[in-house]
Image: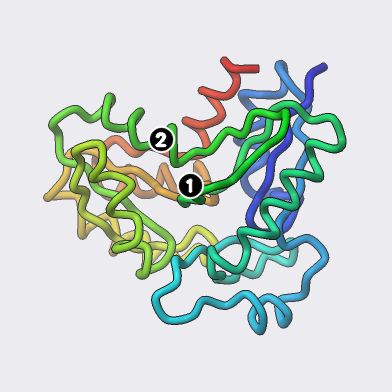
Amino acid sequence: MKKLGMITIGQAPRTDVAPILEQYLSEHAELIQIGVLDGLTKEYIETNLYPEAGDYVLTSRLTTGDSVVMSRAKIQPLLQNKIAQLEQSGIKQILLLCTGVFPGLQTTNSYLIEPDHIIPPTVKAMVGNRRIGVIVPILEQTESLKPKYSQYGMNPLFAVASPYIFDEVNFHQAANELKDKVDIILLDCMGYTEEARALVSKISGLPVILSNAIMAKIVSEMI
């Protein structure tokens, strides 16, 4: 069976979202998980990788279940090293388990599948001229992610609810903020689960797109 490398910007294994991908990929490929933060303590991450003012901010999950926030600039060299590690092990296709934008990532022989290159144009094709709402994990992303959509002619309304601190109150608030203003909602983080999708859909009464599910469906056709 073929192997698909999967890099989380947090720690592996991702027991929260890997089952969603495996639902679509298990018949096509074995999922090989690796994490940018593998082996690092939360204290080290908060001391050395925490965002500075003006940084592009990311968040992910540790194997303890804790969430952390990080600077893209500080973790990108670590991410590039993980890509090289998978390539050296013979993995030919690598999925980045993050919807954030990472300019300049490189591979030597493998094909790197970057969700930020796939999800926005796919969603644009699905949405057309309808109004789109986007739920993101942290407030800082409501500004930093706008260019990812504007290049495809979309101007989404944003709301915030973290997949890593699953507080139904936050999801209710985010869904209620969007439900009368948009026609469809995207959960823009690979950490959201089917539980979150179903909850937002129930509250809003709208179709809700789960980023990791749409990526799994697309990748399953590529393997």
Determine the residue positioned at 34% across, 61% down.
144
Query: Does residue 216 sit above or below 43 in this rendering?
Result: above
From the image, tell me which residue sits under label 1: 99
Under circle 1, the secondary element is loop
Number of marks present in the image shown: 2
Q: Position of residue 166 (x, y in %)?
A: 50, 62
Decide: is 188 above or below 115: below
Q: Quadrant of residue 222?
A: top right
User: Do residues under tags 2 and 1 come within 8 Å of each other at their CB atoms?
Assistant: yes
CA separation in Å, label 2 and label 1:
8 Å
Q: Position of residue 208 (x, y in %)?
A: 34, 39
Image vertical order of residue 140 relative to residue 152, above or below: below
Q: Is residue 60 left or right of residue 140?
A: right
Q: How is the image coloured?
A: rainbow
Compare residues 36 and 180 and report the one nearer the observer: 36
In the picture, the quarter occupied by the C terminus is top right
Q: Amino acid at mark 1?
A: Thr
Residue type at mark 2 is Ile
Q: Which residue is most to the right? A: 89
Q: Which quadrant, please, contains the N terminus? A: top right
Identify the residue at horizontal 82%, vertical 65% (top origin).
39
Residue 32: percent from left, percent from top:
78, 37
Q: What SS does tag 2 mark?
A: helix
Res 36 → quadrant: bottom right
Q: Is residue 95 left or right of residue 151?
A: right
Q: Earlier in the sequence, mark 2 or mark 1?
A: 1
Query: Dot 2 corresponds to which residue?
Result: 119
Q: Which residue is painted at 74% across and 26% down in the image? A: 92
Front-most of 191 and 199? Answer: 191
